[in-house]
Image (spheres, rainbow, N blue to C red):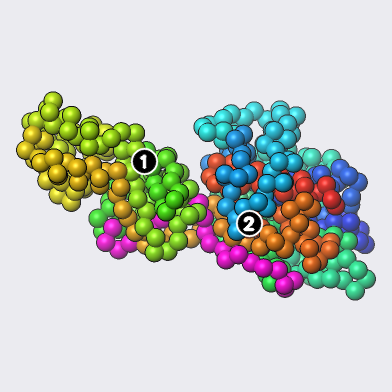
Amino acid sequence: MVTLVSAARWDVVIVGGGASGLLCAIYAGRKGRRVLVLEQSAKCGLKILVSGGGRCNFTNIWTDPQEHFLSANAHFCISALRRYTPEDFIALVEDHDIAYHEKKSGQLFCDGSAKDLLAMLLQHARNAGVQIKTRAQVQSVEAADAGGFEVAAGAHSFFADRVVLASGGLSMPKISSDLAFRMARQFGLGLVETEPALVPLTWNNSDRARFAHLSGLSLPAAVRCGDNAFSEDILFTHRGLSGPAILQISSYWTPGDSIAIDLLPELDAFEWLVAAQESSPRTRVSSLLQTRLPKRLVHELSGMWFDDGRLGEVAHRDLRELANRLHGWVLKPGGTEGYRTAEVTLGGVATDAVSSKTFEVKQVPGLYIIGEALDVTGWLGGFNFQWAWSSAFCCAEHL
Ligand SMILES: Cc1cc2nc3c(=O)[nH]c(=O)nc-3n(C[C@H](O)[C@H](O)[C@H](O)COP(=O)(O)OP(=O)(O)OC[C@H]3O[C@@H](n4cnc5c(N)ncnc54)[C@H](O)[C@@H]3O)c2cc1C
């Protein structure tokens, strides 16, 4: 890691050497600012390394600021996401000859490893003259007597004209901190309640007893909670349900809500059952269902949703009821797996405290907040990194 060159006073101290902190440092450094990044871990960018199964889903080419982000202020993210777009970040990746591919739905992943992306950011930071101090956990940021800010990390104090809080959210507690939220309280900024998001949902007690043994089973489905629905895979686990459709809906789920799962989103189940009854009346209901659903799941639903007679013996009324259940399996999750397995934090520093153009805190000139620490949360699929890059770049432009 880069060795620290002492400077009595930095132009900019950036707290957090993750996605947003590193990109902000690069562009501020390129403008000739003397930039110091303080990172609590032994290494920068740990979340970049674990992201996307080690290949980092670093952006999404279909990023739509009005569709793919949650915030108490839906308009806040629009400006930055339009000023620094997926194409801008892709240009950086291509300049560095990092091979990438679209997995699905605009999601871009490194062909090789997320390590390549982190190495790119660190090299650009070095080239821009950025200094990085690792194992430097910041405890406090305060207005300094001589103007600017004093940033305390362990036994050291650093002085800077400007401070950028890029310390992220609460997911993966071992490598996170609540610094941005503590600082928000200290400076009198609003906080939108934080919750784990993009997180597996857990069974309630009775569903656990019934479905936990289906662990490992995965199938395409459409999952709805209120007005929001996502069509992707769901995955049964010992603890509950996971998979992309569940992670997506978790951002809209609050304790006590039910979710409805459509197990056959691509067809009209009633029409299918009636047609099969006419063409193959001697076929058992379970045998028919197994042509489209995993055997273990059908076995579990047998007796609960249908009596496993021959199709020809089942009344239309019962076929209708089975079709309704297949299209709308209602479950009441017991909770979520929490920050340990969540990809992001929903909520955060209230955006009305911050300029959407510069990311400067309105009440505290010289203090900036970017990335996941703010109340902006992307859908699964590369949108959270894009928010980190966009907010970081726009902030750096004004440093
Ligand atoms: C398992 C996992 C997989 C993910 N996969 C994807 C994906 O594929 N695509 C996607 O778009 N998003 C993904 N995300 C989300 C994405 O990683 C984050 O949204 C993004 O990293 C946020 O960037 P950030 O700079 O705001 O915060 P971070 O990248 O979390 O960086 C914050 C940095 O600040 C440091 N820090 C915190 N507190 C202090 C302190 N007090 N002093 C000094 N340093 C401090 C942290 O150590 C960290 O390095 C994933 C998240 C997880 C957990």
Per the image, is 335 magenta?
A: no
Residue nearest the viewer, comparing 49 with 198: 198
Q: What span is colored magenta in the figure? A: 186-207
Identified at 74% across, 53% down, the residue is 356
Identified at 83% across, 55% down, the residue is 36
Q: Callout 2: few (<14), some (14-19), or many (20+) C-alpha neighbours within 10 Å?
A: few
Q: Is residue 87 left or right of residue 278?
A: right
Label number found at residue 221: 1
| Residue 175 pos. (x, y %) | 61, 58
Amino acid at the residue labelled 1:
Ala
Label number found at residue 73: 2
Identified at 85% across, 67% down, the residue is 149
| Residue 215 pos. (x, y %) | 32, 48
Which of the 4 quarters of the picture holds residue 125? top right
Q: Is residue 131 left or right of residue 310?
A: right
| Residue 151 pos. (x, y %) | 80, 66
Identified at 13% across, 31% down, the residue is 277
Residue nearest the viewer, comparing 192 with 396: 192
